[in-house]
Amino acid sequence: MADRRRRLGTKSHRRSWTPEEERLLGQRPDEDVAKKLRCTVSAVENRRVRLHVPTFDPGWRFWTAEEDNLLGTVCDAEVARRLGRSESSVQSRRLKLGIGWVNPNRRAWTEEEIRFLGTEPDSVLAQKFHRTEKAILSRPLALRIPKPKE
């Protein structure tokens, strides 16, 4: 956008932040600061984040590298409990970093279970292996095992 303005010879709408304005960041909610400075909330938030100023919310804090390393190792609820953060905060951070989800109820397929796939109807195998019919249906598809004739 700045390049385009330069080429067209138009002025930027952005102005510099004064030290007095920057001191307001994090002292009050971003909405209040934006209203006082007559700018957008996103402008205030962007400046605050760029300067590493925490939000006015006393429960908010930046993520540390150690906290980031815990993401994806156990389920989000467990990470949230260990870090004293909300589960939605943990999920948002994990997704932002592109880290996969950990399902605490997921268990690995045994060789015996895999051998039986395709030999009996899904409903019978689901009961036998204590798995859902959907799991019994999807695993053979992933392994390209033909479905038995019922």
Image (spheres, rainbow, N blue to C red):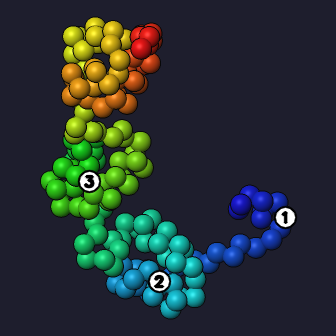
Frontmost residue, 141 versus 20: 141
Element marked by disc 3? loop
Q: Name the front one of labels 1 and 2.
A: 2
Query: Is 29 on the left-hand or right-hand side of 36?
Result: left
Q: CA distance from mark 1 to mark 2?
A: 33 Å
Say above or below: 98 vs 115. below
Determine whether label 2 and label 3 are within 8 Å by CB. no
The residue that mark 1 highlights is 8
Q: Residues within 10 Å of mark 3 (few under 14, many from 20)?
A: few
The kind of residue on which mark 3 rests is Thr
The residue that mark 2 highlights is 31
Name the image quarter holding the N terminus: bottom right
Residue 64: image tag: 3
Element marked by disc 1? helix
Element marked by disc 2? helix
Frontmost residue, 86 versus 28: 86
The kind of residue on which mark 2 rests is Glu
Dot 1 or dot 2, earlier in sequence:
1
The kind of residue on which mark 1 rests is Leu
Dot 2 or dot 3, earlier in sequence:
2
Name the image quarter holding the C terminus: top left
Horizontal and vertical percent position of residue 36? 50, 91
Frontmost residue, 13 versus 105: 105
Horizontal and vertical percent position of residue 140? 39, 16
